[in-house]
Amino acid sequence: MRYRVRRIGLASALRVGFVLGWLVALPPALVLGWVVIKLVELVDGALSGLRQAEVRLPSFELPVVGLVELGSVPVDVATPLGLDSAARSTADLASQLPLVFVGTTLAAVLVGALLFVLGALLFALGYNLIAGMGAGLELDLLPVGREQQEHDHTA
């Protein structure tokens, strides 16, 4: 039996797009969540290092006093550079890394699934437009169990 698919139901295309969309988007979303966590940790470490920098002053010797050690002086480099608010923001994010991971991953899965749904919807609309002009997909269908009979007759 030969059949032609005249149209694809939009609701069906949306369902398939949603189910496949989140499945396809989940692995890259997990990787993106991990990358964001590592970036937050890296930036937080760098900015906290700028806020807690130390300048080590050199030792010198005076003839009467002897060796003079000045030690080190703490220096906040982030404030003059205007990075105070960025340092506070990254410290807040770094204190909630699991929440950042979950939020980033869910947002990426949602965006990926929506893009997949949009692609499935556009495909279905395009196919329905083309199939309406008579250029639809043609299928040869056989009842179950008839495949062996058809193969035996052709051999």
Image (cartoon, rainbow, N blue to C red):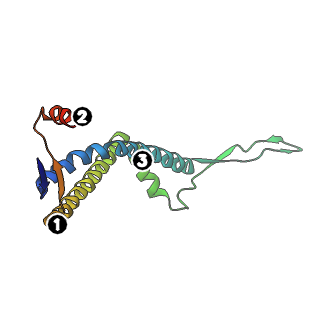
The residue shown at (67%, 45%) is 72
Question: Label 1 crowding class (10 Å Cα cut-off): few <14, some 14-19, many 20+?
Answer: some
In this rendering, would 78 be left or right of 68? Answer: left
Q: Is residue 90 above or below residue 125?
A: above
In this rendered view, identify the residue nearer to me: 37 or 67: 37
Q: Which residue is mark 1?
A: 129
Question: Label 3 crowding class (10 Å Cα cut-off): few <14, some 14-19, many 20+?
Answer: some
The residue shown at (22%, 61%) is 122
The mark that comes first in sequence, 3 or 1, is 3
The nearer-to-camera label among 3 and 1 is: 1
Q: Which residue is mark 3?
A: 36
Disc 3 versus disc 2: distance between alpha carbons?
60 Å
Q: Amino acid at mark 2?
A: Ala
In this rendered view, identify the residue nearer to me: 112 or 137: 137
In the drawing, what numbered circle is on residue 155?
Answer: 2
In this rendering, would 59 be left or right of 47? Answer: right
Residue 142, position as x, y percentages in the image: 12, 40
Residue 128, position as x, y percentages in the image: 15, 62
Disc 2 versus disc 1: distance between alpha carbons?
40 Å
In this rendered view, identify the residue nearer to me: 117 or 39: 117
The mark that comes first in sequence, 3 or 2, is 3
In this rendering, would 72 be left or right of 120? Answer: right
SS class, disc 2: loop
